Image: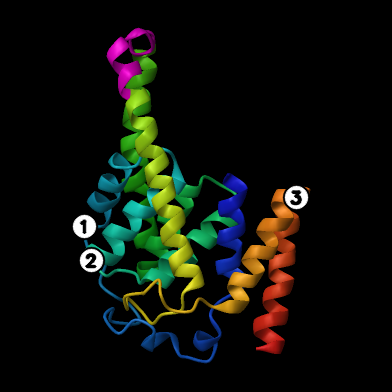
Amino acid sequence: MRKFFVIAAVIIATLPHPAKCNAPSEISNPQIPISPNPQIPLEIFPVFVKINLLTFGGGLAMITVLEQETVANREWLTHDEVGEVVAMAEIIPGPLAVNMATFTGWKRWKFPGAALAVSGLVVPSLVVMITIALFFAGFAKNRWVGAALKGIRPAVIGLISAAAFSLGVIFLFPKNGNEAVSLWQVPDLATTGLFVVLMAVEWRFKPHPIALIGVSVAAGMLLFGVLL
C-alpha cells in the first residue's frame, strides 16, 4: 500500500500539468500574496501542533488534515502546492510527516517557517512518547488504552483513504489555484495514463520504488519536456 502512494507522489513531482509549464507562478494562486519576504504568521506553530494531535496513522493520514488547515482554513497553500509538498516529502529520505511540515513552512516562509512547522509537529509527539516510555508497563496493560487503539484503526483507514482520494483529485484533474474541481471533468490524460501504467507494473512485477521513480522522471521529461 505504501508503494501506491510513492508512485502517486512521484507522478506529481515529475508530471506537472502542461497548462502550468509556461505560466508564471505568481498567477497560479491569486489569493496568496507573493512577496520577496512575506510576513511569518505566528500561528504556524500551534497549527502544526493541532495537525499532529489530530493525526493517527503516520504521514499519509496527515495529508487530509494538512490540506484542510493550510488550504481550506488559511489559504497558505493551493491544492496543487499540497500535491508538490507530498511529492517532495515522499521521494526524499526521512519521515513523511516531518518532510511535509518542512516543505510546507519552507515553501512560503523559508527557514523560519520550516523551523516553526517542524517544531509544532515534533514537540507534541516527543512529549507523548517520553510520557509513554516512563509509564510503558501501565499503558501496555491498560485495557482501555488497548480498546482505544483498536477503535482508532478504522479512523486511520478512513484518513488514508481520504488522503488517497484527495491526492488523486489534485494530481489527475487540472485546475487553477484553489479553484473547485469537478469529478465530471476530463482528467489529464498523460498523467492518468502514466499513473495506470506504473500501477500495473507495480502490481504485476513488484519493482523497487527507486526504479519506478527513475521511470517517472524519464517519462515526465519526455512527455512534458519534449512531446507536450
Is label 1 or label 3 in front?
3
User: What secondary structure is the magenta-colored segment mainly?
Assistant: helix
- In the rendered image, residue 127 lying in the magenta stretch gets the answer no
* Residue 209: percent from left, percent from top: 70, 52
Q: Classify mark 3: residues with Cα within 10 Å, few (<14), some (14-19) or many (20+).
A: few
Label ID, residue 128: none
Say whether marks 1 and 2 touch (CB < 8 Å).
yes
Q: Classify mark 2: residues with Cα within 10 Å, few (<14), some (14-19) or many (20+).
A: few
Label ID, residue 74: 2
Q: Residue at x 36, y 7 (%)?
A: 141
Q: Earlier in the sequence, mark 1 or mark 3?
A: 1
Res 111 visible? no
- In the rendered image, residue 140 lying in the magenta stretch gets the answer yes
| Corner quadrant of residue 40 | bottom left
- Total numbered labels placed on residues in the image: 3
Near-viewer residue (13 or 193):
193
Compared across the picture, whether 187 is left or right of 127 comes to right
- The part of the chain drawn in magenta is 137-148
